[in-house]
Image (cartoon, rainbow, N blue to C red):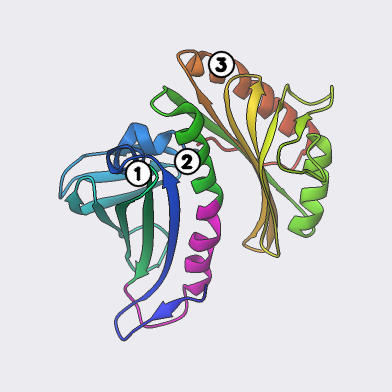
Amino acid sequence: MPVKNDAEKRWVELEFVLPGTPEQLWHAMATGPGISAWFTTTTVEERVGGTIAFDFGGGAVSQGTITGWQPPARLTYEEHEWSSGAPPVATEITIRSRSGDACVVRLVHSLFTSEDTWDDELEGFEAGWPGFFEVLRAYLQHFAGQKAVSFRVSGSERGTHHEAWRHVSEALGVSGPNIGEQRAAPADAPTLAGTVERVQQGAKTCEVMLRLDRPAPGIAEIGTYTYAGKARFAVSFFLYGDRAAEAAAEIEPQWRAWMARRFPDADATQS
């Protein structure tokens, strides 16, 4: 959807139907453990005036102040230093119940500016969320309430993100995927096997999400995109269960070593 605007701000908005009660969705979207289970490592001071901080790894932390706290229906917060020179961005999350044990979640990002200088960033917000919300959906359906640990390995290469997708998907055995298929990485890659849950290919991103059988119960999101004129690729892991932390400690170094060997220009980061 195009960026919307009025005299004071510019914004994008998204809406999703997700399984669960308002209380379950509130936990998943307004608490540190809940957000960390499907997005990135996050801490939340659960009150108006409290801090919400998203740790993307490698020292990249985006921090905001909670401006509205109305469980289980509405959370708002503002981030003032999310990007160098950028105006403040305000985020509003609303949750409302609907029939069939599901909720409608609406998310709005607003920039307090009348200029279109940051529209690419707003569109980037909009393009990035659907993949994470599909991780959230799978978490709620298959792993709700379980302990969670996440990490991410990423890198870049010359060329288009479609070219990067071809290289990464072939290297990990997920090229040409269909939903419901069982896929496994070849022997020269770290252990990776599971069921294809989501496929998304477009002008800006290419993504495949696996519900993992190996190396541990969880979800892997494999994708490519373009940022700052470069083709970027990332593999995000969300591991669940009582052994999640132990499994992540074992698996993460293997993936970093493989990324450095297979894609020497990779700039690996953790989240």
The image shows residue 263, relative to residue 144, as above or below, that is below
**Label 1 SS:** helix
- Image spot of residue 89 (x, y percent): 34, 64
Of the residues shown, which amino acid type is indicated by label 3? Ala
Give the label on residue 247, or none: 3
- Earlier along the polypeptide chain: callout 3 or callout 2? 2
Camera-near label (3 vs 2) is 2
The image shows residue 163, relative to residue 194, as above or below, that is below
Q: Are marks 1 and 2 in contact (CB under 8 Å)?
A: yes
Which stretch did the figure color magenta?
112-130
Between 22 and 193, the residue placed more toward the observer is 22
Q: Image point 74% across, 28% down: which residue?
A: 258
- Magenta: main secondary structure: helix
Give the label on residue 136, or none: 2
- Image spot of residue 133 (x, y percent): 49, 47
Q: Residues within 10 Å of mark 3 (few under 14, many from 20)?
A: some
| 127 within the magenta span | yes
Q: Residues within 10 Å of mark 1 (few under 14, many from 20)?
A: many
Q: CA distance from mark 1 to mark 2?
A: 9 Å
Give the label on residue 29, or none: 1
